[in-house]
Amino acid sequence: MREECAVFGIFGNVEAAKLTYLGLYSLQHRGQESTGIITSDGREMFEHKSMGLVSKAFSKEIVRGLKGDIAIGHNRYSTTGGSCLINAQPFMVNYKGGQIAIAHNGNLVNAAELKKKMEEDGSIFRSTMDSEIILHLIARSKKRTLNEMVADALTRVKGAYSIVFLLKDRIIAARDPLGFRPLCLGKLGGAYIFASESCAFDLLGASYIREIEPGEMCVATKNGLESINFSKPADPSAKCIFEFIYFSRPDSRIFGENVDKVRRKLGRRLSKEAPVDADIVISVPDSSNTIALGYAHESGIPFEIGLIRNHYVGRTFIQPEQSSRDLDVRIKYNPVSGVLKGKKVIVVDDSIVRGSTMKKLTKMLHEAGAAEIHLRIGSPMITHSCYFGIDTPTRSELIALSHSVEQIRSFLGAESLEYISLEGLKSCVKHPDDYCVACFNGDYPVDCSNCRTDAENAGKTITSGQSDLKGL
Ligand code: SF4
């Protein structure tokens, strides 16, 4: 599994661009491929977009040049469309009412169908992103007011979207009726702030107010905040349970719960479901740290730092031929042999997708002296692709699709392997029926019979995962 995207918006602060920069900085974990900010001073819009990390993309001068007291921003990890600057967000167009920009987290499942129809009617698309379709729908809407036009467009798209729109005098934040992705509302003095996760508010000293509800649009203007229900919220909703397992930061509050607390519960439940006699518990940092702590507390087995993660290495220098020599994993993680030597080690990770990384890690830990490796996984077996904004590979690449736990254990080279049960996972959240768990059971909350993953759309063939599977 890979990250998805982050959105941020602020209305009513003279330092809107700077605060958006900081907000995006704290949401960097949700997307590192490209980033961008668009601001408005009430008359004109200003934009800067770049490939790469927030810290690299913006200088002080660039931020200073983004004038105005309204801003939206976006960090992208591409799930639809290719990896290039034209697909970076926020994405801005001119339409009959002026300029409008969008920052979108999620994925539309009827995008191809809508786009085909629009192209047949003569529309020209600048990007390959599904987000651009929403802007076309707004521009084509026959409704009278701007808010009605946006609401009209949103009722025509299906799938996952947490969005902030920027217009010259307002921000509109909206969340799909199923509520797949989080979107929070905060306040800093008199300014309204919208962010994918509440951790963005902490850095700014803003206070958390509430979530944008599924099917709700919040419109921030100089007259205040207006809430519009553009669609009836789905019952049950389909919040992405993976946000708790992996995507969101532990210091965030999303879907009405603290991520850290849910993650610890996951670890405790995993320990109850899959106990093992061992000397230490270690995590695959960073996403699994809190799950591992929960496991350690419940089992009474000490938590140790057995793997060090290097955060500062990009993928640029890793060539495919080096990847086969495990360099991609070695460059990211280093085992602490003094901790591992001669020990029976419980290794807690959040998920196994293809299994290729875990296989290399297991080998590395054995080589560092671990006597036994017991893998404990904080999510059930992933057997289905995600079509709602998470970058999963084609279904055939998922190791759990066609292999038993025992076959996977043997492939990974561990002494034991156990996953948390779906029931166990659901028991860790307050309202288990309000969550999407489709990647574990194929029970998609919207019709996905015509959906394809990014990899399938790109016509990619199976890569490392396939060759790994051949080794089974
Ligand atoms: S399929 Fe999985 S990753 Fe995708 S939204 Fe549902 S729970 Fe989240």
Image (spheres, rainbow, N blue to C red):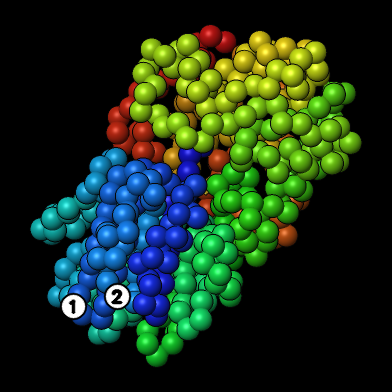
Residue at the bottom extreme? 223
Q: Which numbered disc, 2 or 1, marks the residue that appears first in the sequence?
A: 2
CA neighbours of label 2 inside 10 A, class few (<14), some (14 to 19), many (20+):
many
Secondary structure of the residue carrying tag 2 is loop
Residue in the image at 61% along x and 58% along y: 252
How far is the residue under mark 2 from the one under mark 1?
Answer: 20 Å
Q: Amino acid at mark 2?
A: Gly
Q: Is mark 2 within 8 Å of ligand 1?
A: no
Horizontal side of 437 relative to 46 (left or right) equals: right
Residue in the image at 73% along x and 37% along y: 292
Front residue of 468/100: it is 100
Q: Quadrant of residue 347?
A: top right
Tell me residue 441's x, y (percent): 60, 40
The label nearer to you, 2 versus 1, is: 2
Horizontal side of 221 relative to 175 (left or right) equals: left
Residue in the image at 69% along x and 33% along y: 283
Residue in the image at 81% along x and 31% along y: 274
Q: Mark 2 touching mark 1, by CB under 8 A?
A: no
Q: Amino acid at mark 1?
A: Gly
The quarter of the rendered structure image containing the C terminus is: top right
| Disc assigned to residue 295 | none
Q: Quadrant of residue 78?
A: top left
CA neighbours of label 1 inside 10 A, class few (<14), some (14 to 19), many (20+):
few
Tell me if I can see residue 310 in this picture: yes
Tell me residue 233's x, y (percent): 53, 70
The residue at which mark 1 appears reads as 97
Q: Is residue 69 above or below residue 127?
A: below
Q: Is residue 458 above or below residue 38?
A: above
Tell me if I can see residue 183 in this picture: no
Tell me residue 148's x, y (percent): 32, 80
| Disc assigned to residue 68 | 2
Residue at the left extreme? 122
